[in-house]
Image (cartoon, rainbow, N blue to C red):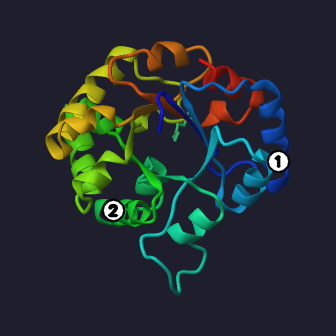
Amino acid sequence: MKGPVFAANWKMHLGPTEARAFVAAFLARYTPREDRTVVLCPPAISMSAVRDALGDRRDILLGAQNVYSEPKGAFTGETSVAMAADAGARVVLVGHSERRHVFGETDEATARKCALASAQGLVPILCVGETLEQREAGETEQVSLRQLRAGLASLSREQVLSCAIAYEPVWAIGTGRTATPADAAAVHTVIRRELLALAGPGAAGISILYGGSVNRENAAALVAALEVGGLLVGGASLDPESWNAIAST
Ligand code: 13P
């Protein structure tokens, strides 16, 4: 993905009808730009509506918020990577903190999802980040690195090179409490170092996104921080005006 990457994670908001209206309103505002990648991650049930509403706008990628850790089978309610790809997804969020903390997703399941997504030709955006408790205990780097290594464990070097990473400190998600650009830069630098160790010099090109209470006021400073290669945005991506301001940063 060409950087910086601006990815919207709508979480459990915007069903097909609202998603169609959102895309129309966003496209009316957003001027396509060659120097960045814009990704929309609607709920699974709205993916086809978003794909249709995007029409031939190849500059905006469709992403899935999650996929299941098995390729197919009797898993009621789940979405496979092949289904997400068939619905038009080019990108998939893996290991989002809500998957880990609300749904109890393990590092092992996250690794399987990364491997399946990668084998399917989708770009996994592997999400990592520490809780407030872990930050206060001085475990920020350790937690993010553990999640990073575990999530990428079953990928080949080439597959690692085609992933993206999102650093989303759990204490900053949906709380209005954003990491400072310096906080983000510190963790992103550690993540970059680890990626270089895992996958060699090509890892300098892996996008590392920051997420957690990003809004139109703080987006420019965060995306300018050292090693920050994009933004993963929840709440502020739900309004076409605000999302346009962020994606046009
Ligand atoms: P908020 O932008 O609402 O804090 O959510 C961040 C996030 O979890 C994006 O994946």
The residue carrying mark 2 is: 106
Element under disc 2:
loop
Instruction: Name the foreground residue: 149 vs 172.
Output: 149
Residue furthest out toward the bottom: 74
Displayed quadrant of residue 46? bottom right
Location of residue 68 with respect to 20 vertically, above or below: below
Residue 29 x/y as whole percent: 79, 25
Work out whether residue 18 can be spotted: yes
The extreme left residue here reads 197
Q: Residues within 10 Å of mark 1 (few under 14, many from 20)?
A: many
- Disc 1 is placed on an element classified as helix
Q: Give the residue drawn at x 62%, y 67%.
A: 86
| Dot in front, 2 or 1 | 1
Disc 1 residue lies near ligand 1 with CB under 8 A? no
Residue for badge 1? 20
Disc 2 to disc 1, C-alpha distance: 33 Å
Q: Residue at x 59, y 22 (%)?
A: 215
- In the image, what residue type sits under mark 2? Thr
Instruction: Please say if 41 is above or below 155.
Output: above
Ligand 1 quarter of the rendering: top right
* Circle 1: residue type: Arg
Residue 83 locus on image (x, y percent): 59, 70
Q: Quadrant of residue 44?
A: bottom right
**Viewer-proximal residue among 171 and 225:** 225
- Give neighbour class at mark 2: few <14, some 14-19, many 20+ (Cα, 10 Å): some
| Residue nearer the viewer, 199 or 234 | 199
Ligand 1 has an atom within 8 Å of the beta carbon of the residue at disc 2: no
Q: Earlier in the sequence, mark 2 or mark 1?
A: 1
